Image (tube, rainbow, N blue to C red):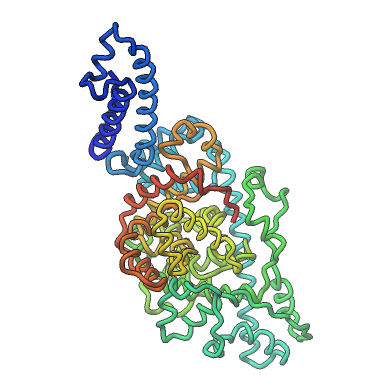
Amino acid sequence: MLSLPFTTGANAVKDLSIYKLSARFIDILAGEGGAGVGTVGMWTDSSNPNASVVVAVTAVAGIVIAAAVFYSNRGHLNSPWSRSRRKPALSPEQWKLLFTPEGKFICGGVKFLKKVRSGGVDPSIRSEVWPFLLGVYELNSSEEERRKLRTEKRKEYEKLRRQCKQLLDSNNSLKVKESSGDNKIEDNENHSHVIDSAADTEEDTSTRNSPCWKEMNPSAECSDDVSSALLEKDAGSERVTDVKTSDTDSSDSDSDSSVEVSQTFTTTESTEEKGPEVASNADSSKTESQSTPTKKEDFTTWQRIIRLDAIRANGEWVAYSPAQAAVSAERAMSSAEAVGLKDYDHLEPCLIFHAARLVAILEAYAVYDPEIGYCQGMSDLLSPIITVMEEDHDAFWCFVGFMKKARHNFRLDEVGIRRQLNRVSTIIKCKDSRLFKHLEKLEAEDCFFVYRMVVVLFRRELTFEQTICLWEVMWADQAAIRAGIRKSAWSRIRQSAPPTEDLLLYAIAASVLQRRKLIIEKYSSMDEIIRECNSMAGHLDVWKLLDDAHNLVINLHDKVETPFDG
């Protein structure tokens, strides 16, 4: 007698129906369907001339049943994030047991990534774990190699900060000269365009060429503060201001020298200055940016926007970092002074300290990757990282690792954003043709209503802790693929949990599909869908989101995924 795989609930009913249908199919083919003789009788009656036919038909039917049950269950396999299979976060005790005496991962890090992927990381060890997830450290590195690399990375970060300080000092000296009237008219005309552009913000409302940019920044549209409009302007199409600086013959040779030195900086360092580990971990995004020096005018623009964003950063992180929340006023003021931060009198010391750290690291990144520089939204991505990583140089390199993929979200041509939106659209089309046809009817099939989710990776739709949980799972997927684990150890469980570069996009599609009925029955414009997506903030279950995303990956992975290179 054929046996069914053990299933429960709705799947069990479906499997039983398949079995009964197949049994009836056997009876009919055997020619006994109407004679009241069941399949058991056909098997036991050796004198029956049709017995051999029944055996053959039963064997074929058995294969059909097995295939039907397998494929009916394929899309319903419990994901690592389902309530029944979800595991506790990686604990400090488990973390210690993952290493050999030399400080290398056991099994090449496979067990480590599986554990993080299924439950996240305990908050007490996140600062140790994240550099591995974000590619700062290789999974096959030893403790000694990591120690040397960390020292070299700290020196490289300090060099970037010195360049930022030179640019800041140069800008300040120019402001002093302009205010005193000592500089020539040419200097005033050139630099006032950059420094004083707020004066004509109301007349020039140029913004990023995206219909959803205001939806991502609703405060900019409603604010009476001119700086909000300026932020909108600089974060968009005029984020990089190309100003040609005329030659001057100032009598102040020291100041002129300072300007000349800080006019442009490149982030290129020779491989001789770095260790082999640093060279091997070279970021492709940095390679792209090395040919683009940091212009002083560009940096001035980024500097202003960074400070505006840093001051306005929310304090949701405070509950997750008691040490930084308890920072003294003296230390906070010192940090603010070191980066030239002003207009923070209304902030608590911990928020001043947090803002100063945002400024320091974002400025360093703008010099490190001048092709991207700074754009609004990047501070949203950095804030959780500096909450976990207490040393600025560690936080910076984690942010660099994060931005290897996320940097495409901030390109002015929006190529990376549009490719990701197209992926979300494809997932929805393959999963729910009715919903997709409705979106087509509303001219919303390009999925621009999830623009904000893509740009800041769900940061504004999820709580602080939920964001970190989602990001850790996403980083574990990307780390597995980066290490080639996708093609080896994980290939054996590909049907239950294939790692993907674009887990975030499946999660975004899942959040839309969860509201399919509402969208189809009640919404008649893309603006209504945008409002619905923005209203998701604080109302999402991150583990349910991951569970639904997993089912999409299982069913659609081979149909929609191609190498994504932004």
Residue 33 x, y percent position in the rendering? 26, 24
Tell me which residue sits at (56%, 87%) in the image.
Answer: 204
Residue 510 x, y percent position in the rendering? 38, 54
Q: Nearer the viewer, residue 339 or 4?
A: 4
Q: Quadrant of residue 259?
A: bottom right
Q: Quadrant of residue 147?
A: top right
Apparent side of residue 486 relative to residue 60 in the rendered image (left or right): right
Residue 199 x, y percent position in the rendering? 55, 90
Q: Quadrant of residue 496?
A: top left
In the picture, the quarter occupied by the C terminus is bottom right
Q: Nearer the viewer, residue 81 or 297?
A: 81
Q: Is residue 430 above or below residue 335?
A: above
Q: Is residue 389 above or below residue 216?
A: above
Q: Residue furthest top?
A: 47
Tell me which residue sits at (38%, 61%) in the image.
Answer: 324
Q: Nearer the viewer, residue 558 or 225?
A: 558
Q: Nearer the viewer, residue 455 or 226?
A: 455
Apparent side of residue 537 relative to residue 449 in the rendered image (left or right): left
